Image (cartoon, helix red, strand yellow):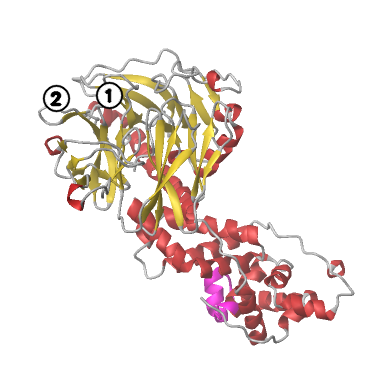
Amino acid sequence: VADQFDDFEAFFLAHRRALSRTAYFLTGDDDAAEDLLQSALAKAAAKWERIAHTASPRAYVRQAMLNEMRTRWRRRQRLVEHALAELPEDRDQADVAREVADRQALGDALRQLTKRQRAVLYLRYYEDLSEHATARALGCSLGTVKSQTHHALERLRAVAPELLREQPAREVSE
Amino acid sequence: MSRQLLQTYRQAATEVPDLGDSRRAWRRGRRQRRVRIVGAPIAVAALSAAVVVASTQQPWDGAAPEPTQPQRTERTVEPTRSLGAWIPETPEIGRPAPIGALMYVACPDGCEVMLRRPNGSELPLADVAPEAAAAVDAAGVEAVGLSYDGQWLGVPDGDGYVLYDLSGDAPPHRLASHDGSRWTMVGVGSFNWSFARWEDGRVVEYATGDLFEGGGIPQHFDVPGDWTTRPLEHTGDGVLVSEPVATDGPPSSWPRLTSVDATWLTVLRGTGVRPGTTSSSGVRDLSALLASDETLAGPRGVYVERTGPIGSAEMDWPTVYVFDQDDDTRTPIGAIVADDREPAGGWRFAVPESTVGDTWRVLGSLRAESLAVAHETADATEVVRIDRDGSRSVLQRLPAGSQVILPGASPIG
């Protein structure tokens, strides 16, 4: 058992960064991301003997998080969408520019989306999946991916247009 | 558009904190797995109960006496916030908790941690120590240790370890860890317990807490960087390690434990000259008491408990756990009491063999001549005392699937 845990922990440490990002971009919130990742890791732990030697335990955990999100939106436990009017109307453009570099800005914006919209955007634009692959990952139709992508981008343009402006590149480590 | 959004994601990605806790996830996942695994055989057993009962695999060996029932097993909750509400106050050093006192939780999620008295009455741990109860709930009861006298509760907290005084006299004491390291419990003795801090697969620090003199606050002993020690046994006043237990004099004279392979627990010589280690001597070859697929070395070292009260004749009879080696898994299946007066070096408790829906699991030693095991059926978890002569008696009957912690027993495996 100790050896299995060591194996599991080694996997976790090797992929923690990537899995943390996935969880965060699917939720837009630190606490919710923590819960989502923990839940997926526990599922992996329960089946570790079986998945440890598969091609990609990380893919299993990622898919477990996507499944969990899918389950949640099917339960219609959507987050309350804040009205655009609730956002500050006289935001200083310099402040906005500074915020763009902050993940909090993206988190705030992502929380304006539905869970399904967040998942679609994450898969399409961060993981760079095709529409077909995104549909397969989320277990939905191609039409749903297209419509959710459209609505998500429209929403982002409305609540956080600065996120869609090109920014100076920054080195990203795995 | 896609390039801009990807850029935004990547910039934000650099600032996402490291999330997740592998240890907690592992515990949670394995508990879920255990429930599923246990549940399936129970269902099978229920369907074929008549066949099983009629077969030669009787739940109790016909040659052994039938178990006696506990005097009272009804739940009588008495919420009183003091240690004395659970077990008698034990100011005497080395005095054990009475046989039959234990801690348990009836289900992995959502059940209260309960303190059960020998007479079968019980109370929630939260009534005695709310903070400790919350910590156990978060960590999982299988990871905690309870001191020999029942006063101190050790609970993992992330990579650290917290000691709670159930009498309420002392504040919780935390064994703080460092990045990338974690504490594990090595063992509980009659008047202290020991911990090891692991870092990159090796022990870098030991801590031994005197439960009386220091109020549970451990003394720390750093392990020199060139030592590759592993904790081998908790010895009652320290930890015996696998490499030099003292470095005074020329290396050839260093006391050291030379072998902890499958069947031997061998100390060539030891004089107990270093803090955190102990005197230990003699050669214990227990191979005569082990089958070919059994070992004394568990996942975190050799598990040895000394459970006799200080000053008693039982005190120097260590109980060593026996593990079954099945592939990569080592499961505690029995115990040997090392006794130099015995030709085989000790004697072994006969733990009944588990069958589907009827399993036996070692919990810990009660005294030198008795062992506690959990007998799990579809109906209940019985805590059974097995004595040296093979006689058995039911100490407690708990809800099916209960997890049990005995005073003086550290997590095994």
Q: Quadrant of residue B219?
A: top left
Question: In the depicted view, which residue is nearer to us: B203 or A70?
Answer: B203
Kindly tell me whether residue A149 is visible in this rendering: yes
Residue at the outermost right position: A90
- The amino acid at mark 1 is Ala
Question: In the depicted view, which residue is nearer to us: B279 or A12?
Answer: B279
Residue at the outermost top position: B71
In the displayed structure, would residue B31 be above or below residue B117?
below
Whichever of callouts 1 and 2 sits on the residue coming sooner in the sequence is 2
**Residue B389: % across, % down:** 20, 19
| Residue with the mark numbered 1 | B368
Q: Is residue A128 magenta?
A: yes
Q: Is residue B114 magenta?
A: no
| Residue with the mark numbered 2 | B341
The span picked out in magenta is A126-142
Mark 1 falls on what kind of element?
loop
Apparent side of residue B120 relative to residue B61 in the rendered image (left or right): right
Q: Are marks 1 and 2 in contact (CB under 8 Å)?
A: no
Apparent side of residue B327 relative to residue B141 in the rendered image (left or right): left
